[in-house]
Each structure stands twice: as structure tokens, then as C-alpha cells.
Amino acid sequence: MFVEVAFPISSYTQFTYRIPKKFIDQIHVGIRVKAPLGKRLVTGIVVAKSAESDYSGKHKNIKELIDLQPVMDNKLWKLVQWMSSYYFTPVGQVVKTVLPAKLSTKYTPPTTGLVVYKSFGDNYEQLQKRAPIQAKVLQFLSVQERAIPIAALKHMVSSPNAVCKTLFDKGLVDLDEVTNLPDVTGFTFSKIHKEIAFTNEQKLVLGELSKKLNSRKFSPTLLHGVTGSGKTEIYIEIVRQALEMNKSAILLLPEISLTPQIAGRFRSVFGDQVALWHSRLSHAARAWTWKQICAGQFNVTIGARSAVFAPLKNLGVIIIDEEQEYSFKQESPAPRYHAREVALMRGKLNDAVVIMSSATPSLESYYNHVKEKYSYLRLNKRYGGAPYPQVQIVDMIKEQEETGKFQQVISSKLQKIMESKFAKGEQVMLLQNRRGFAPILRCGDCGHVETCVQCKIALTYHSHERLLKCHFCGYETSNIPIACHKCTSINLKLLGVGTQKVEDVIREQYPGIKIARIDFDTARNIPALTRILEKFAAGEIHVLIGTQMIAKGLDFDNVTLVGIVNGDTGLFLPDFRSGEKVFQLIYQAAGRSGRRKPGEVIIQTYNPDNPVLIHAARLDQKTYYNIALSERQELNYPPFSWLIRLEIEGTKKELVTTHADKIRKKLSPSPKGIDILGPAKCYRERLRGKYRMHIMIKSNKTHDTNGEKLHSFLQDCLAVGLLNRLPSSVKILIDVNPVSVL
């Protein structure tokens, strides 16, 4: 018997091995094995099993089985195969992404041995004479109220296990063992109970979703509900119905900051059926959770994009909350998948309902609804009849002229409204979508900017740690210059505003106000993040400052003011999606205000006439989306075309340029309807020590309805050697449906 094995390498080649007799009945498709690859013993996954082999050379043997049963079922395996084809990634690399690192189905959580006193027996005095240490331990155990860990006796004896075993054999104690389950309680709020009376709008939406669920057919649905319309309650009810049908459910969230609050809501309804799945779990917690899901102990999985691969059986519904968010896209390593696309395919393979939900849908999903590819359900009203917040734009240039204060962080208008909210005991959220203290350290005389040694990117100053950091490669230095490296001037200036600076300004202006900050730096400690959100929900924190992590999905009754510190952030990046991203961020952030009480939103900007900001301030989504779609159609960008981006990177600029030109020539001529742009330097030309260029391949949907023409074109180019003869120092990254072209 033989097997085909795929390894997590860049080659599409699968390798044939002989199955030793001892493994013949144990090896199946989907089981991981260790096999010789060159001079190494490498972990791979079995992709086929057969009685004969076409390979005429000498076959090597499988050396070891990692799993006792397949780590994925047939439908999940089909998903892996689809991802390999769609994202131009070898099967072995896809498997490496789908399965958590260091996963073992043989994993069992560690245990703790317990001992409890039973009796002194009939010969305790004799025990004291012959085995005084045993007698001493027995005496100690007799005064304990309950069983204690055997290891707790180490202060008395050097080998407590042996002593307790002897006492057990004599019938004087009882031994027990408890499993040490991974602690994931720090990732959720305490159970949040809410009495819900559905509105007529919600009932209509639920009625439609129930029909789709009961049909047991694949049904992609866009749930377009305004902020505060009660979408979470819809999720809970449709998941409850799925569980009643003995089906399982996945809820995908874009931000780690959303997990604690929503998990608390779900745990209050579904109890211990809910599993959390995201990158911040320890390897032990991930291994245990995966095994419990496989065993059917969990029927609901909540998590970030990788939760789409949870090995749930009988999948009935997948919900993608805030489906427009770009964090659902994996940028690196390959496969560069989008969780929304993968969820749709998984739903198709499982005949499941896929709900894409948002107050600000992606233009792609909105367009698919217009083209009737997705069902469309609408929630137009806020739950409980809460009014939309009043939104005002503050012109920061005019503010400077009137006050004479330059580089002002908080305008007088925002300051005045904040003070009125504090006086009423209400809470404030401040959004600044840039972490650190200041994004630029520049010489005031020659203009030199401190940049990363590996990237052509300005270093951000972090005041709390007194470090200059690169937010792309992770480089950091505590060597803060006191003089310009270029002209030796000491006239160095920190320019721009990050969340740390906003925090410092608010603390200085309002010393009696309790403040907390949530950004990538503070969110690394998830239990601490959970505590911040719980304290803010309880009213113990008055001002919550943060990046986009606080802009969506969070629900706080007492927040009546949201301040957008700089509405221009990201607005002028050379990316065809930049306007859409800024509109969605501001619209979503505004939705945090006035959930239960009348709310206000202040947008500070240096570009008050920008149409993106004007329509965001009006909460006029339909007009803005029509404008954006018109622009995209004119330029033949998604959603009117399919897009694949080839990124060429390497340590030597000349080699990158040379091979980018060669690849471009090999792509010609292109079929009708397919346009090729570039090569051109990436906006961020140098990252992580590598120079970058890119080529865009666009295929108009008029000629290519489902993208097959574009995929076939690139597949054919690859088959005839598009990427052949590349030096090892030059890499080509293939990004299907990129969310950023920077």
C-alpha cells in the first residue's frame, strides 16, 4: 500500500511513500505523518491512499503517525483543496494554516494528583514507630477539609507520590486525579443576561433566516443593519435554532477586542457549548479546544478569521460580524485567504446559511446584493427607538486661526462637549486610528526623518516605553537621538498624534477623570483588555481612547459622545479602497454613541469639504456607496473586476526590478477583458529589509462572471514557467482579491 503526502513547502509536488505493515490499517486521508524528505524527517499530511504506485523508483517508508484519527473531515478537506487551487498555494501550506501550530490529536491536558485522608487504621502507633514520615503525612491530611494536591506535601517529604501510594495501599488514604483544563475565562466578560423582546423588524429578519436554515441549503445572506439595531440578538436566536436542529455554528469577529463582550452574551445563553478560537490562546488551550470540538463538546465557535476552520460537525450557520473588515484577510504567509470567501465556500460545501452582517457592508457585498447574488435583509431602526447621534464636523484649520493654537489635539468644541458629558456622569469614546505617541520624529532645520533600518518607513515614538518603533517589521530602539543624524541640529520635533498623546493630553486636562486606552500595545494582554472593557461597561472608566479596535461592535449604554480626533487618517493613501475604509470607520465609530440616550459625534478634520467626511457626517451611506461604485466602475476596479496582485520582493533592488520586468513580459499577450498594470514600485517600497514591486492583473466581470478566466490565465502562465529561473533572493507573492495595494 502507498500514500501521497503533501508537505508545508512551496512546491506543489506530492510525494509517494510505502506504508509499513504495522500502519496499513491506521493510515487514512487526513492523518498527519512523519516521513523522510531529503535528509530530514518532515511532518506532512496524507492526501491519497492506493494499492499501487506509478512511481518507478525506490519508495521510502512512512516513519511515524502523528494522529490516531484524521484531523479534518471530508468537507474540511475539500475546503483545503479549494483554497489550494483558488489562492495558488500548495496543499501542504494550506494545511499548515488550517491546523493550529503544535496540534496533536494525541494531546491530553496535564493532570493533578489529589490525596484525601480516609482513616488512621488499627496500627497508627506502630506506623509512627516504623514509618514516621508516613505517619506525619497522615496526621497532616487528617486535619485537611478536602482533598489536596499531592505536590503540596513537598514541604514535608521529598517524594510525596511514593508516600501517598504506600498509604493508599494500606487503605489509609484515597487518591484521585483531576484534569487541568486551560484557562480561557480571561477572554470573556462575566455572563451577560439580557431580556430581549424582538421588534417587528427583527421578527421579519428572523423569519427569513429561519426559512433558510430549515431549507438545509447553502444560502449567502447580507444582513444590513444600522448601528444599534440589535444584530447580536439576531445572531443568538438563529444559533439557538441551529442547535435545536442538532447543527453547529461559527461566529467570526474581526477584532480581538470584540470577543469578550460577545462571548459573554453567548455564554449566558449557550453556557459551556461555546468555544473561543483565536491567535492569542496558548498552544495548550488551542490543542485542547480543537480536540474538544472534534469530540463534539462544543457546538458554537467564536473567534477571529482562523475560527472559520473550526472542525465542527454538521455545520448549520456561519455568521461574519462586521464582514467589511479587512482584518478578515490574511496578508502573510500564504495562503492569503479572506475569511469571508472561505466561509462562503465552507457554507456551500456544508449546505449551511452564511450571514454576512454589517452596518457598513463592503462594496463587494453591497454590489453582490444589487446583482442578486446574495439575499438581502435590512434593519433600518435602532433597537428601542434610540435616535441616531447628532454629528458635527470641526474644521481644525479654522480652529487654529480662531485660537492661535497649532497642532491642537482636542478642539475647543470637543472639549466643551466632553465637559458637559462629565458633568452628567456620561461616558466618552475617543478614536485616533494611530498608536504610539507621535508617528514622526523630524529635524526642524533640514527636515530629516528618523526611519526604520529595515523599512523605508518613519519610526513612531512611544512615550510610555521611551522607544522608537517600526509598526511594520517590529524593529525598536531606546536610542532616542538628541541631535539630527544628518545636520547635527538639536531642533528635533515630534509630529503627529497617536493614542498615547491623546491619553496624555486628556489626563493633563482632566486629572480627576478615569481614562483607559485600547490599541495593539495594550491589547496584547487579553485578560487586561477584558478588564478594561468590563470596567468601562460598569461606568468605572469615564473616557475610553483607542484605535479602530474600539470603533465597532462594542455596546455601552452610557456612551453619549464619540470624538474622532483626526478624521483624515488614511484618507489620502494611494489605495482605491482608502475612501471606503475611512467612511466605514467613521460611520461605525459614530454608532457607538447614543445607544440608550441621545448621543453626539465630533469629527475633527483639516479637510472639511472632503465628500467622504461629509457623507459620513450625514450618515448618508447610500449616496456615498453610489459615488464610490461609480468611481470603481470607471477605473475597472473591484467589485466590477476580479483582481490578482503579484508582489515581487528581494533584498537587491536591481534584481527585483529586472525580474519584475521579465514576469511582465511573460504575461503578454493577455486575453480580451484582462488588463495588466505595472510593474511599479509599491507605495511602501522597502519593508522588512526587502524592496517591493507589484503587478496588477484585472479581469472585467462583463467577460469573466466568476473569475475563472483570470484564474485559468494565471494558472496557464505558471504552468509554462512564469516564475522559473528566479534567484533564491527574489520571491513572488500571489494575492488573490487583495484588500490593499500599498
Image (cartoon, rainbow, N blue to C red):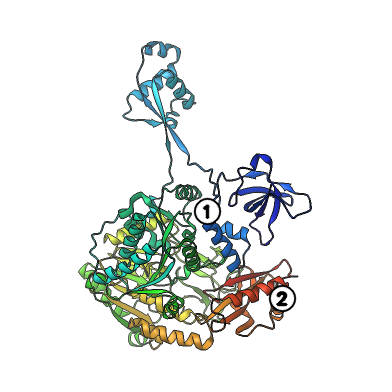
Q: Is residue 520 left or right of residue 17?
A: left
- Foreground residue, 701 or 359? 701
Q: What residue type is labelled 2?
A: His
Mark 1 surroundings within 10 Å by alpha-carbon count, few (fewer than 14), some (14 through 19), many (20 or more): some
Q: Residue 327 at what x, y percent from top left? A: 47, 67
Which residue appears farthest toward the right when viewing the image? 57
3D distance between C-alphas at marks 1 and 2: 41 Å
Which residue is label 2 attached to?
659
Q: Is mark 1 on a helix, strand or loop?
A: loop
Instruction: Say which mark, if any, is on residue 525.
Output: none
Q: Name the residue: 64% across, 42% down.
A: 23
Q: Which amino acid does label 1 sit on?
A: Asp
Left or right? Give the position of 45 relative to 633.
right
The residue positioned 73% from the left and 72% from the top of the image is 721
Mark 1 touches mark 2? (CB < 8 Å): no
Image quadrant where residue 63 sits: top right
Residue 40 placement (x, y as % from top left): 71, 49
Residue marked by disc 1: 73
Q: Which of 2 and 640 is in front in this view?
A: 2
Residue 333 in view here: no
**Residue toward you, 229 or 522:** 229
